[in-house]
Image (cartoon, rainbow, N blue to C red):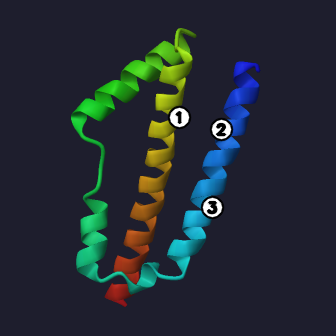
């Protein structure tokens, strides 16, 4: 399978997972207390993971990723998408709490 086809398949899976989670959170995100929303906004990658992502991204740009490394990079992307989604819902909850 070509790299483009593999990336397309994984991107579709990531979008599907985040879309499903988004629907779940839509039903409950405005119920987050301000404390919960603030705690969610504190969730982030630590420096070790950030450095690993940078290394994997550089190897990807150079076309030197192994299949195992490519899967790790995809996992980081998925977690990043999920964190972005959670952060967005937490910000919305804080906005609603301020009204």
Image coordinates of residue 11 in percent, x first then y, are 66, 41
Check whether the beta carbons of the residues at disc 3 and disc 1 lie within 8 A of each other. Answer: no
Give the Cα separation between the discs numbered 3 and 1: 17 Å
Please say if 2 is above or below 36: above
Check whether the beta carbons of the residues at disc 2 and disc 1 lie within 8 A of each other. Answer: yes
Numbered disc 1: secondary structure: helix
Q: Is residue 4 left or right of residue 21?
A: right
Numbered disc 3: secondary structure: helix
Q: Which badge, 2 or 1, comes first in the chain's sequence?
A: 2
The 10 Å Cα crowd at callout 2, few under 14, some 14 to 19, many 20 or more, is: some
Please say if 30 is above or below 23: below
Most foreground residue, 6 or 81: 6
Give the image quarter of residue 46: top left
Numbered disc 2: secondary structure: helix
Label drawn at residue 59? none
Image coordinates of residue 83 in percent, x first then y, are 41, 54
Residue where numbered disc 1 is placed: 74
Residue where numbered disc 3 is placed: 19
Residue where numbered disc 2 is placed: 10
Residue at x 53% of width, y 9% of height: 64
Image coordinates of residue 19 in percent, x first then y, are 62, 61
Q: Quadrant of the N terminus?
A: top right
Give the Cα separation between the discs numbered 2 and 3: 14 Å
């Amino acid at each position: 399978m070509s790299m483009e086809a593999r990336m397309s398949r994984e991107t579709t899976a990531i979008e599907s997972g985040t879309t499903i989670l988004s629907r779940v959170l839509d039903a409950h995100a405005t119920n987050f207390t301000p404390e919960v929303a603030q705690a969610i906004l504190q969730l982030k990658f630590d420096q070790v993971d950030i450095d690993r992502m940078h290394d994997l991204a550089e190897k990807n740009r150079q076309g030197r990723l192994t299949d195992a490394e490519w899967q790790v990079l995809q996992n980081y992307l998925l977690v990043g998408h999920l964190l972005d989604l959670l952060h967005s819902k937490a910000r919305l909850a804080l906005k609603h709490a301020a009204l």
